[in-house]
Image: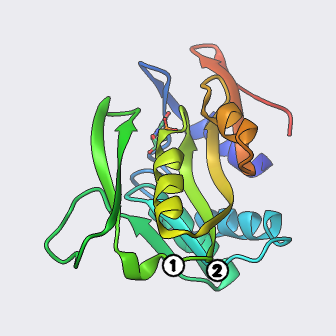
């Protein structure tokens, strides 16, 4: 998606640890028109598969997931990172390692919102080592639902998550894949 790559080039900031900061339009301040366009692009890319529900992980995936859900007219479910008191019963849950925080956290989804046989499209803002997506896949597996694919806004192709998940058979559609980035600039994989 050319408009996304242009935006990353002009507004993205490279932080230590190969972290890309895109807080001007995606992760802090959100460019609502642009995120709606991202939602439409994912809806176009996944138009060949029936999707019952979108699943993402709080908090940065939620805005994009809502844009996709709006374009596809399906509900959006986000995995929570805390077992809050308003979660009833025994939820589906698993532990995820956070790349940006270098710590583990538990993600949970209430059982009534993820059902056996549902066709689920995963959405997230970034794909790095693939731990967040693997956590969501585990929740889907616990529910007996089906992952039809994953839509990623920015994949860091120099980290191994994308390749591992594709090799495992997951359809991963990334709107921008960064081949490498350093002080001289950001280079994207041809797509
Ligand atoms: P993974 O689990 O694939 O290693 O990392 C994906 C998660 O970590 C995403 O949900 C995203 O929130 C965060 N993340 C990973 N790399 C980056 C990055 O370079 N920039 C930002 N802003 N978030 C990242």
Nearest the eye: 176 or 28: 176
Residue displayed at 62% across by 26% down: 160
Specify the quadrant that holds the C terminus. top right
Where is residue 32 drawn, in percent x and y?
A: 54, 68
Q: Secondary structure at mark 2?
A: loop
Disc 1 from disc 2: Cα separation = 10 Å
Q: Residues within 10 Å of mark 1 (few under 14, many from 20)?
A: some
Quarter of the rendering containing residue 60: bottom left
Mark drawn on residue 52 = 2
Rendered image quadrant of residue 95: top left
Instruction: Say which of 18 and 172 sits in front.
Output: 172
Where in the figure is residue 59, as x and y percent of width and height?
Answer: 37, 58
Q: Which residue is farthest left? A: 85
Residue 49 in the figure: left or right of residue 178: right
Which of 158 and 67 lies nearest the eye of the viewer? 158
The first of marks 1 and 2 along the sequence is 2
Q: Is residue 48 above or below residue 151?
A: below
Give x and y (percent) for residue 140: 52, 63
Up/down of 153 relative to 9, above or below:
below
- Residue mark closest to the camera, 1 vs 2: 1
- Residue at the spot x=23%, y=77% of the render? 89
Whether residue 39 can be seen here: yes
* Nearest the eye: 23 or 140: 140
Q: Is mark 1 within 8 Å of ligand 1?
A: no
Quick one: label 2, few (<14), some, or many (20+) residues within 10 Å?
A: some
Image point (43%, 80%), residue name: 113
Point 69% across, 76% down: residue: 51
Label 1 belongs to which residue? 115
């Amino acid at each position: 998606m050319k408009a996304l790559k242009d935006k990353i080039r002009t507004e993205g900031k490279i932080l230590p640890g190969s972290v890309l900061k895109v807080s001007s339009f995606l992760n802090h301040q959100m460019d609502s028109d642009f995120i709606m366009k991202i939602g439409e692009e994912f809806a176009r890319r996944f138009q060949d598969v029936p999707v019952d529900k979108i699943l993402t992980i709080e908090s940065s995936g939620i805005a994009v997931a809502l844009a996709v859900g709006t374009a596809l007219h399906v509900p959006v479910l986000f995995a929570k990172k805390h077992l809050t008191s308003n979660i009833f019963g025994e939820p589906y849950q698993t532990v995820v390692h956070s790349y940006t925080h270098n710590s583990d956290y538990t993600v949970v989804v209430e059982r009534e919102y993820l059902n056996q046989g549902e066709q689920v499209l995963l959405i997230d803002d970034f794909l790095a080592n693939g731990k967040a997506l693997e956590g969501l896949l585990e929740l889907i597996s616990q529910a007996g639902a089906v992952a039809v694919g994953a839509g990623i806004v920015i994949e860091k192709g120099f980290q191994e998550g994308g390749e591992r998940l594709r090799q495992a058979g997951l359809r991963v559609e990334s709107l921008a894949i960064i081949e490498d980035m350093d002080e001289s600039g950001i280079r994207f994989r041809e797509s």
